Amino acid sequence: MCGIVGILGTKPVAVDLVDALRRLEYRGYDSAGVATVENGHLERRRAEGKLRNLSERLTREPLNGLAGIGHTRWATHGAPSERNAHPHMSENVSVVHNGIIENFRELKDELMRAGAVFASDTDTEVIAHLISYEMRKGADPVAATKNALARLRGAFALAIIFAGHDNLMIGAREGSPLAVGHGDGQMYLGSDAIALAPFTDQITYLDEGDWAILTREGVEIRDRQGRRVDRPKVTSQASGFLVDKGNHRHFMLKEIHEQPEVISHTLSNYMDMASGRVRFPDLGIDLAKVSRVTISACGTAYYAGLVAKYWLERYARIPVEIDVASELRYREAPLPENGLAVFVSQSGETADTLATLRYCKAAGQTIASVVNVRSSTIARESHVVLPTLAGPEIGVASTKAFTCQLAALACLALAMARARGQLSDERERELVKALLEVPRHMSTLLRDERRYDELAHWMSKSRDVLYLGRGLSYPLALEGALKLKEISYIHAEGYAAGEMKHGPIALIDENVPVVVVAPEDDLFEKTVSNMQEVAARGGRIVLVSNADPESIGCPVAAHVRMPQVHPFVSPIVYALPMQLIAYHTAVLMGTDVDQPRNLAKSVTVE
Ligand code: AGP
């Protein structure tokens, strides 16, 4: 993962590098560093932990170079310490890297035999030594980099600077995204256009295998074979403003509260409000003839896809295959003719999802992606993009992106149902009306957050928490458990309520809260039976439901009262208590809610 940036500037670049890194912190925040070319030699500053530690270090020990690179890290090889922080250096080369060099061990052994002395435990450091090794053999920086790139296996986006070369920076892309920014007498590299937004909106995205030679006068791009290639320059829409928390204590809370508005925006993109019908973009495929839908994604986005599977099967009567992206791509799953493959991703950069997209594309599927970042790699490689209009999501725990994904996928399900003759006009209007009521239900629920206080006190003292749900509520149980564990670090598991008796029931005692997601739908009675099984073993039920706790015939320790909503939209509305239970529990426990340990917002490694 990690975020990288590079600047060939006309004034000292360290402060701008840190500014750009601030926009890339969502990619990792274990450590950060910058290096510049100063009076012909390389100088660097690095710091463990958040970016502010690097800023403080630079205030004490400034850098004055006009050419520099920067990095914010999510550790893969080597602990998150200063010694492993990027940039990494050899005697005359400094490099920042996003990705993983798979053959770094063999390269390291070879370079050590040739006399290289390594100062970190990272895979990245081999790149600097490898380029230096080529330069010692007589190659200039460009030729040395070309030779070194040919020997690297794995995924990388790189920015490289050289001692003695104040007007040269090389970038390379293989598997990880990299953008070139064009300024006026200044040039930039960045993991994405957002990082470069304060400096330029003129962006060229590198293709796989491309590498770019930058000077202040411009850029020359070459492909994997070393041939000069033209890549288009586009105007980026990324905003230069850093999003702030407003009056909220955390980005996560702000983003939870934005949901009524951003869900409305997303829905209005796919609906004709006047007629109460879905208005869907042309997918370039006859929806009536789609033989199967394959859905793939990771984490919370996968759970959005799982809800969509239930919707598509039930309302459009179409078979749906779904798997997490890290599995689907390696299963060698056969894919059907006339298949539609749907990828769901907030960032649009998740490496596993992207690789699975490419697998499905190569197998002839029509590729649709539900993404929040329009300029992302997943969006650019899809045949059709179904945007979510959630706006930038900063908190690592996905909240508004999830509910906007659900909103877009619900519209896809209705569009398919209509195309396949499974949806009468009347039924379509009923379901569209239900969707349009979601923002109002969410606003009402957001007016009373105090009800989570007591529950959070109790949850924060638990070691384990179970989440149960059936049907459309099953993915919500999974999402509730993921949300709680990722920000509070409490062990939580989500299960299909009917599966509990096949194993998880052994965990239940009076210390284990069991959160049951149970809207009064056609499966409610079955879920009530499962609650009774929990109660019979002394388990403490947290009922999240519009039903009266008295009606379930067993003791309920806590009740999150929900409004009566149409069963079709319950997963969107019930996402809110899942988010708020996790949020308030984490706040009480004093964890870093927006940047929880070991995680990153955008996961660009396999
Ligand atoms: C959600 O709270 C997580 N942080 C994580 O599971 C996330 O949804 C997953 O990594 C997928 O990210 P994407 O939507 O950017 O592809």
Image (cartoon, rainbow, N blue to C red):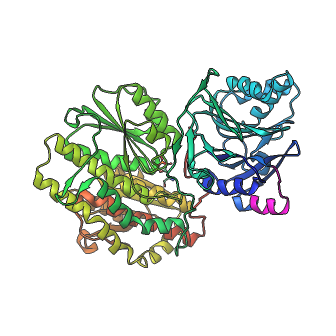
Residue 599 visible (yes or no): no
Residue 442 visible (yes or no): yes
Look at 22% across and 46% down and name the residue there.
415
425 and 163: which is toward the camera:
163
Residue 583 placement, left or right of 220: left
543 and 343: which is toward the camera:
343
Residue range highlighted in magenta: 54-65
Name the quarter where the C terminus is drawn: top right
Residue 359 placement, left or right of 243: left
Which picture quadrant has residue 507? bottom left
Residue 168 placement, left or right of 511: right
Residue 155: x percent and y percent?
61, 33
Residue 291 covered by magenta stretch: no
Give the vertical position of 566 relative to 337 (above or below): below
491 and 236: which is toward the camera:
236
Look at 55% across and 48% down and name the residue there.
602
Residue 317: x percent and y percent?
19, 41
Name the quarter where the N terminus is drawn: top right
Residue 74: x percent and y percent?
65, 48
